[in-house]
Image: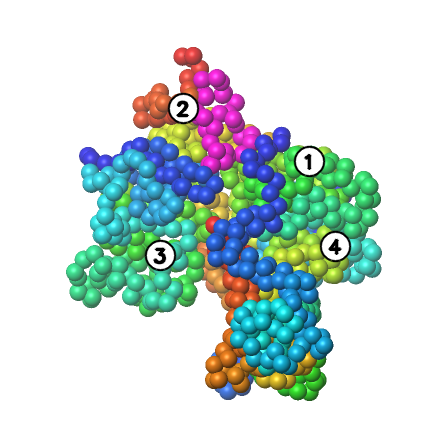
Amino acid sequence: MTDGTLPIPKAQSPFRRFASEFFESWIARVALFTLLAIIVLALAAPWITPQDPYDLAQVDVLDGRLSPGSEAFAGYTMWLGSDGAGRDLYSAILYGLRISLAVGVASGVIALIIGSLIGLFAAYAGGRIETIIMRLVDLQLSFPAALTALILVAILGKGIDKIIIALVLVQWAYYARTVRGSALVERRKEYIEAATCLGLSHGRIVMRHIMPNCLAPLIVVGTVQTAHAIALEATLSFLGVGLPQTEPSLGVLIANGYEYMLSGRYWISVFPGLALLLTIVSINLVGDRLRDVLNPRLSK
Amino acid sequence: MTAPILETRNATKRFSKSLDFAARLARRMGANVSEETVHAVDGVDLAILPGEVVGLVGESGCGKSTLGRMVAGILPPTEGSIVFEGADIAAMDAKAARKAALEIQMIFQDPFASLNPRMRVDQIIGEAPLFHGIVSRTDLSDYVDDIMRRTGLDPSLKRRYPHQFSGGQRQRIGIARALAVKPRFLVCDEAIAALDVSIQAQVINLFVDLREELDLTYLFISHDLSVVEHISDRVVIMYLGRVVESAPIADIFDAPNHPYTVALLNEAPRLDQRRRAFEPVKGEIPSPLDPPPGCHFHPRCPHAHARCSSERPALREIAPGRMSACHLNDE
Amino acid sequence: MTATLSVTGLHTHFFTRAGVVKAVDGVDFQIAPGEVMGLVGESGSGKSITGFSIMGLIDDPGRIVSGSIRLKGEELVGASDEAMRAIRGNRIAMIFQDPMMTLNPVLRIDTQMVEAIRAHERVPKRDALARARDALGMVGIPAPEERLRAYPHQLSGGMRQRVAIAIAFLNEPDLIIADEPTTALDVTIQSQIIHEAQSLCKRTGTALVWITHDLAVVAGIADRIAVMYAGRIVEAGGIDAVIDTPLHPYTVGLLGSVPTSNRRGERLTQIPGMPPNVLNLPEGCAFRERCPRAAAACHAQPPIAEPRAGQVVRCFHPHGQEASR
């Protein structure tokens, strides 16, 4: 007395189904391609750029403020021009992207891990513990992120590690709130009751049953928050409290060119600005598409 | 007489919605807010013999699912106790309590929400027996195959995810998951209500077969009287958190005692009753937040008199093996 | 007497990414004034889509591909949106499983009911209000004056469904389509609602199509029954004839699946297998793969036959025909 088997096309894994749906939108395809291209360019920077902008021996002040297409003293063409310190902007942007992406991803991943563990703990513990944690989250979220980050960096000082710590402290609360929300929904479902009934341990129920089912919104928030972190880092650097002048991120480059904007040397600010814009927009578009595909209410 | 495998003694569950800070503040300022308490289950005594199938019937808000969850160990009782093979589960040491918890398993209503969508079928079925050391990792695959075959599932499908199965197959996966820890007692909470009619029959037959093969005892919770009548040895009828009648299957369907049971039996749709004209029982089911005093059924009861609205009728034995909670039996 | 509704050769298909879903694939039936017809089937049988097709509520990617739906002789397939809006709620009304499909949660009951009347008729507000009150009384709502001033969330589920039914009957429509209206309700409330719907139809001459999966409910309310399987009506006829002497093997199997008191404790006769995938229906009779009587002939589509007066079946080997075979 077996049921006949269901006529299912293939033993399609949830991931495959998700991927095929994701690529249905051309905007998502373009955005993901752009993002991957940016990442590849950033990673390959040392091999595809004529100059290492961090190596002071390669930077010549006499090359300063050259317009796009000029020839550098060392003989190569500066397609995007140079900044006030004589850095080739093409090289500086790619190296800057490395820093921006690294800071964004590192702070995003750390905040995601810390935030979601806190959120899961709050949802599963319930009661007073949950109330205290969630009030803390509310408090954190009620301050403007840029302001909090600014204060934290002012206290902690400059440097990549300090920036990452500041960004994690600003962002964990978003993850905690997201995870708690979906964990509360999942927790009430019958499969969690079944796991309780089967005598599984609390840790196992949280990590094996609740956590994997909260991943979808977490991934969406993760992408959007990474873009946010990159923008925040650029803001801090622009304001001069972020990364040092010797290792310019995109924000520093924009800030450096700002004073030349009115004298017609637009390229020093505009090209790094465009690179930042492209990065953030492509991440956000990918995030939007993820949200559409992962949202069960929108799927047919 | 054999000893019952499971008893509930004065099992009671209250859900109270305690006031949050804003509500407490509002009350201090004179607003009319108070803590709300729902008596979901109100002092239920139940004894189930080994091998018996007990049908638990009632309408929404009667507390049948809450009682089932207390028996299955998912909700702790507010008062009273759940007794498994003569021992109170709450008073057991950790090891004995875990053993008792595994012996009582539950089958859920919703075949979609009751399976973890991120796990493959073999993981769903095999997780608990592996975790509790019922089966070793090397034997796990054969063990899962065997249980899948027993529940009418094709073992070659065990690498699939729940969403690739139909409702009936998913319900079988849920049954297989419960059977994997070798239970002796199954709580089936509306286990077939969400299935299509032709699939319902398949799953009912599976329950009947498994009972014989594995010596199982069932607490079969349902709102559907015809299903309960088909599968059960004994029926317990609940209304607003209390048991109103309990009797062997033949007695209750041939000669119901409590007026609520009479109404339920009259009004359950049946194939052999066509276009009938009758006067259905009046009124709505009262809110469990604010149940009527005395006998909960008195506002809708055609035989209610003064005593019914003031005094709670006790559940008494009215004939051997038959219990009913109605003042009419005293006259 | 002319039929209130006459559906012939209705095909409603959905053009999805995965392929064409033939949700309704050749449905014919008629229903007379005051008659109650039970439309029975399992999930995916097309019973609800039939109801939505009659209401003109098929949205993309679905489309009525062919067939005719006539309300008192007037063709509804291909009618303009404007014409359908005038008909919906006035001459055809619908009751859903979830009454909140009909009720607006932020408006009071009286506002909604008066609006429903005045959308189709120019009547003074006072008269509309009186009619709304009468309608609530007719569906057995105690203290209708009070209920009129309530918001939907202040009513219980059963009470809301009664209000939805009262709204459906407000303009004395020719036809009401009820899609699983009591499935979410308790037994005692269900029987009250069935009782009231039945007597209202007899009194007003409104025809009622009661869509459900529950054979026992249909037995309690309907005059006639149509059994759907995989987009087609496989058997239709008077309620007593179909339930007591079913012809189609699917109907026989379905009836055998329902536990009844005279077979207490026995194994139920179950239909093997599962309903077919609507994306990929087998050739010929869709039930053939689960059917104990299937033979080579079943690879062709069986025609509609009427082996007994008033009872039609789509099967080459119907039950009750053994003598003639």
Specify the quadrant of the image occupied by residue B98.
bottom right
Q: Residue sitting at 27 percent across and 38 percent down?
A: C69
**Same chain for the residues at labels 3 and 1, yes or no?**
no
Residue C102 badge: 3
Residue C301 badge: 2
Q: Specify few, some or many for label 1: CA neighbours under 10 Å numbering under 14, 14-19, or 20 or more.
A: some
The answer for which chain carries disc 1 is B
Q: Specify few, some or many for label 3: CA neighbours under 10 Å numbering under 14, 14-19, or 20 or more.
A: some
Q: Is residue B219 within the magenta segment? A: no
Q: Which residue is mark 1?
A: B155
What SS does tag 2 mark? loop
Question: What's the magenta region?
Answer: C270-299
- State whether residue C295 appears in this view: yes
Q: Residue sitting at 53 percent across and 63 percent down?
A: A282
Q: Which residue is mark 4?
A: A199
Disc number lying in front (4 or 1)? 1
Residue B325 percent coordinates (x, y): 57, 54
B133 horizontally vs A51: left or right: right
What residue type is disc 2 on? Gln
Q: Is residue C278 within the magenta segment? A: yes
The answer for which chain carries disc 3 is C
C204 horizontally vs A146: left or right: left
**Same chain for the residues at labels 2 and 1, yes or no?**
no
**Same chain for the residues at labels 3 and 4, yes or no?**
no
What SS does tag 4 mark? loop
